[in-house]
Amino acid sequence: MLLMVLIFLLSCVVYIVHTLLDSSNSSHVSNTIDDFIDLGPDCSEDISDVISVDRYKTVYTDPGKQILILYATEYGFSEDVARKLYDRLVDFSVSKDDIFQPRILNAKDYELISFDQEQLLLLVIATSGDGVSPSDARPWYNDVMTTDSNLRHLNYSVLALGDSNYRYFCRAGQMIDSRLLYLGANRLIERSNVDMEDWTVINDWIKKIISCLETVVIETRVDYMSSRLPCNNDGYCRTRPFVAKMKVKRNLTTVIDSDDKETIHCEFDLSGSGLEFISGDALGIYPCNDPTDVEQLLSVLGSTGQEQLNPPQWAYQPKPDGKISLKKLLQMYYDLKNIKPELLKVIQHGQKDMNNTLNRLLVDGLSVKKNKMLDEYLKKREVVDVLKEFNYESVAMETILTNMKGLQPRYYSISSSPLKDKNTACITVAVVRYKVLGKLRSGVATTHLQDRMSVIETCPVFISRNTDFRLPMNKNLPIIMIGPGTGIAPFRAFIQERIHDESVGKNILYFGCRNKDKDFLYHDEMETWVNEGHLTLRTAFSRDQKSKIYVQDLLIQDACLVWKTLQDGGHLYVCGDAKHMSNDVHSALLDVCQSQGNMDQSEASKYLTLLEESQRYQKDVWVT
């Protein structure tokens, strides 16, 4: 008995010593991470030994029922959905004491897949740009659309992500769904189309998948993919950005009145990164939240900000393996501006007394597409506003964070050609400042670059491919570029490249802004190129005269020139706002085709569609 007591006491001593050592090590790691965050990501070499392992890269060695979760993403949301699906499948497997083995794979790594050995495919695919698959997924997408494989053994379901503001809503998901069915695959449940980030639709699709697992037949096998999982050493990318130094920052506009446009030009040094870009690509930037916004949120939470919490699973690399302060988490990883409807739901569940305002907001559900009252409410508020307005005190901090959106990277068309300088990526940024409900608001990334980041300081960046926005291979062909405001960015790169290549094809640019003297971006360069014969420039300064004039008006005025350029094999490019400008330009082009090509509206529409299909009419547009 005495011996057992001595053994027990010795075990306790060993445990206490081990715990103290772990605590010491954890403290060291935490301090290292804090130093990394305070000083900037260029200290990443100091924390290379604390990079966490991705729990979603599971390797199965025992036999099981494999499920392939394949995602095709441009900006990362498809991956977020895929990971949530993975978590639900793992939970389901545990609850049913079954041996489901979900695996997550990016469609860009499709060559690792043996579809003849797969039994259940769950595909989460975004539609990028004007109705195409994400750039990284294009080889896989093309392979599926051209293969004649027999997939009768495969069960599948598609979750198609898109934005109904674009003409070809969820087109990539629709096309791949139809193709898999054509190849003989068995559609487990109907495709769901998700408009923007409608989690109500997403969760409903996941629930249907889970319910089907109890009946679908999946044979138990040894996972062939365990030896094929891709390594993470594939260079810098969205999930592992490069820490780039800002070399240049200058104002491009003159701001006199409060409603004047504020636009800046920034240059980032990519030396040593191995990153390569092509004119037409974008630079992804991870910003940090405004410290003032963070402090306001901490104040509402009644927090010092020093509470130690784990970073989110989806945080970009390198990320800390240990806990870091809540203040750092909110600065780096969480979206303080845009509210997940689920946050309101958990607050509602945690309230003892019924809040009539909150109940009215949620009576029609969490889908902002169906619940217009909720949509209008969320558009005008930030996370701190919601927490101020409703009693959240019974909701745990971890629950609040779980129901907040992640801080996403922002994408800016690169406004320089790599032929001029392959190690420098320029971007053109319109700084966002506005007032809502009597409160000043600001864009996270734009004010991070303008107000909180100086030349020589660093931030995480990566290259985002835009394979559907490229110059023609034939340098003799003319091009028409239509880009008001910051839409001029990729065209600055195009012109630099055409001049460097000594292209003989004519360069025609339609640029619009409010005032020639205030926001005519890159006007000195443009006028120099005009004088040197490199550029034909048509400008629309909407507020410099009594009647407003826009780029689409110039297109109609120049109908003869536009039509002749198209007849000479010219390529059309449009860059800017998708909701209004792009549609207005498209309407103007239809008018040009009808008036100059002797077509009716249907024929003109078909003509422009043929130009799109032949890559002669390309768009780089976004919804603001």
Image (cartoon, rainbow, N blue to C red):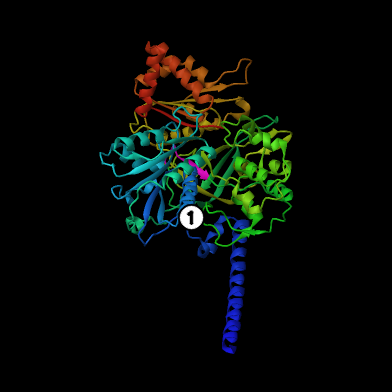
- The answer to if 105 sits in the magenta stretch is no
| Local SS, label 1 | helix
Amino acid type indicated by mark 1 = Ser
Q: Is residue 280 magenta?
A: yes
* Position of residue 16 measured from the top left corner of the image (x, y, whole percent): 61, 77
Q: Quadrant of the N terminus?
A: bottom right
Does residue 380 show up?
no
Range of the magenta residues?
A: 278-284
Front-most of 5 and 183?
A: 5
Residue nearer the viewer, 216 or 590: 216
Q: Quadrant of residue 173?
A: top left
Side (left or right) of 218 relative to 11: left
Residue 354 image offset from top left, x and y in percent: 72, 40
Using a 10 Å C-alpha cutoff, classify the residue at mark 1 as few (fewer than 14 neighbours), some (14 to 19) or many (20 or more): few
Q: Residue at x 67, y 50 (%)?
A: 395
* Residue underneath mark 1: 95
On the picture, is 450 further left or further right than 67?
Answer: right
Please give the name of the residue rendered at 40% of the width and 15% of the height, measured from the top-left corner: 593
Question: What x and y, as percent, mark residue 457?
Answer: 59, 51
Q: Residue at x 48, y 15 (%)?
A: 556
Q: Residue furthest bottom?
A: 2
Query: Can you say whether 254 is above or below 269 in the image?
Result: above
Q: Quadrant of the C terminus?
A: top right
- Residue 64: where, in percent of width, then height? 37, 57
Q: Is residue 458 visible?
A: yes
Q: Nearer the viewer, residue 471 or 2?
A: 2
Q: Is residue 261 left or right of residue 83?
A: right
Give the quarter of the image for residue 447. top right
Question: From what the image shows, is residue 443 above or below residue 394?
Answer: above
